[in-house]
Structures are given as structure tokens and as C-alpha cells.
Amino acid sequence: MIREETAVTEILAAVQEVLPDLVRFSWRLLAVAVILLIGFRAAGSVQKMASRTFARMDMEISLRKFLQSMIYAGICVLTVFIAADKLGVSSASIVAILGSAGLALSLSLQNVLSNFAGGVIILLMKPFKVGDYIVCGTEEGTVTSIGLVYTTLGTIDNRQVVLPNGALSNMTLTNATAQEKRRLEIKVGIGYGSDLKKAKEILLEQFRSHPCVRRDEELLAYVDALGESSVVVGVRGWVSTGDYMTAKWELTEQIKLAFDEAGIEIPFRQMDVHVKPES
């Protein structure tokens, strides 16, 4: 009986000894729970505010979602750091672990991260947008989508070309539809015996009569070069960007037909073979 009373006394003494620590730890857990609750709610609120701000800025949807996610994740990470410090966990240890994991991940995903960074640059700087026709190296087409890693083009023969944003952001590219209008220039070689003035008049007349050529811009017919077998004449005018290819194809055909009708020769390469009779 005495032994049982002694054991109970020892247990009560042990509980009384650790009770203050348990109480302090419970308060810490409660504080951590409050910090996490407030931090995560604040992250959601800031994310919504950022979403409205980005929408008013007319920011690209892919970049908008990415920045919203980064803002939310950043606030959540900061909240976890504060909560961990409240529990007595060293922030330096957490930073070291995250740094090591981040370094290993970045080395293994180097190309992906390069494309990702290129996508952010493209979405921020906006060298082109969805619907533009771009030429990049050997590839060209209409931009159908701009992602954070890849940009997709649709070609005129209905192929789909996927370009990595890392390479795309570091290459020289041409945006053929960035401007409202484009200058159309057509050059033709005519024979030295053809009527030069008449040829220039025909070029101007074909441009004036075409519906796609802008009437508010000046037309110019000129002699470009005196070649070995032809006189190169040209004509310049302006068309709306969307009409460029249609106008070029149609005017090229019409100029050829008009030259034929007017008797203006367009020289072409040919070989004359002379057979010497045997004596």
C-alpha cells in the first residue's frame, strides 16, 4: 500500500514538473495554428487583389496565373517560416534544406528552367502576341498559343510547330503582322529592247487598279538595276498587313499578263547550241 502511494506521488510529481512545459508547448501550438490560419487567409486575399490588378493591366493570362501562384506561394512560405520559428525550429536549417533541394532541382531541370525564364520574358516584353505571324530561323507561322515553356505556331499548310521559349527569347525573329500596313515591292526584269517608260506605266497602273493597294499612300516605279540580260524595274506601294500575300500574288500575275499584252519581254535563261557542220 505504501509502495502504491509512493508510485502515485512520483507520477504526480513528474506531471507537475513537465506541466509548465506542456502548457507552454500548447500555447506555442495554438500560436502556430493562428499564424498559419492568418497567413494562408492573407495569401488568398493578396492573390485575389493581385488578380484584379493584373486583369486591369490587361496582362497575358498565362503570366497572370503564374504571378498569382508565385505571390500565394511566397506568402505561404513566409508564414511557414514564421510558424517554424515560433516552434523553435531554426530558420537557417530550413533555408539550407530548401537551398540544397532547389540547387539539385535547378541542375536537373536546367533546360526547362531556361525555357520557363524565356516564357516569362516573352509574356512581359510582348515581342509578339497570339494571332501574330512571326518568322524565327527556319520556322514561321501564326502564333496560336504562348505558354510559360513553349510557344506554338500554326503554319500555312496546317502544321503545328512548337518552339521552346528559351531559344525563342534569344533569337532574332520577325513579326510580320506587328504593324497595321506593309510596303509591297515587286521587281521584274525586262529586255533591253523593251519600252522602259511603258513598263513603268504598266506597273503603276496595276498597283493603282488593285483594290488592296492603299490610295492614301504614294506609289513609286523605278529602275533598280541594269543587269547582264535585263533591266530590272520595280514598283512600291502600301497594303494592309492582312492583304499583303493576296495582293502580292495577284499583282505578280497581273503584271506578267499586262507585259505580255503590251509586248514587253521578260528575259529568261536559255542556252543556244550551235552545231558546226563537218567540212
Image (tube, rainbow, N blue to C red):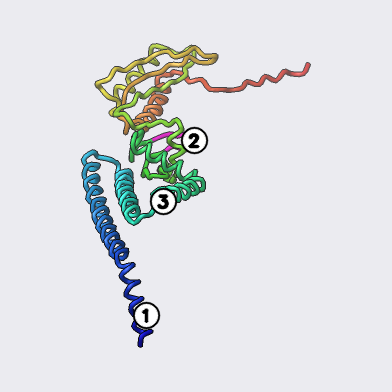
Do residues under tags 1 and 2 come within 8 Å of each other at their CB atoms?
A: no
Which circle marks residue 7 in the picture? 1
Residue 207 in sight in this render = yes
Graded by Cα atoms within 10 Å as few (under 14), some (14 to 19) or many (20 or more), the crowding at tag 3 reads few
Label 2 secondary element: loop
Main SS of the magenta part reads: strand
Label 1 secondary element: helix
> What percent of the width, then of the height, locates residue 27?
26, 61
Q: Give, as a three-letter code, the residue at label 1.
A: Ala
Q: Nearer the viewer, residue 7 or 114?
A: 7
Q: In this view, does 137 lie to the left or right of 181?
A: right
Q: Give, as a three-letter code, the residue at label 2.
A: Thr
What residue is disc 3 on?
Answer: 94
Question: Mark 2 or mark 1, which is nearer the start of the sequence?
Answer: 1
Q: Nearer the viewer, residue 51 or 134?
A: 51
What residue is disc 2 on?
Answer: 138
Q: Which residue is drawn at 56% across and 22% down?
A: 269
Stretch of the chain drawn in magenta: 134-140
Number of numbered labels in the structure image: 3
Question: Mark 3 or mark 2, which is nearer the start of the sequence?
Answer: 3
Q: Nearer the viewer, mark 1 or mark 2?
A: 1
Q: Would residue 258 be counted in the magenta stretch? A: no
Q: Which residue is drawn at 43% across and 40% down?
A: 165
Which quadrant, please, contains the C terminus? top right
Marks 3 and 1, how far apart at CA:
43 Å
Q: Give, as a three-letter code, the residue at label 3.
A: Ile
Q: Which residue is drawn at 31% across and 65% down?
A: 22
Q: Which residue is drawn at 29% across and 64% down?
A: 20
- Residue 228, quarter of the rendered image: top right
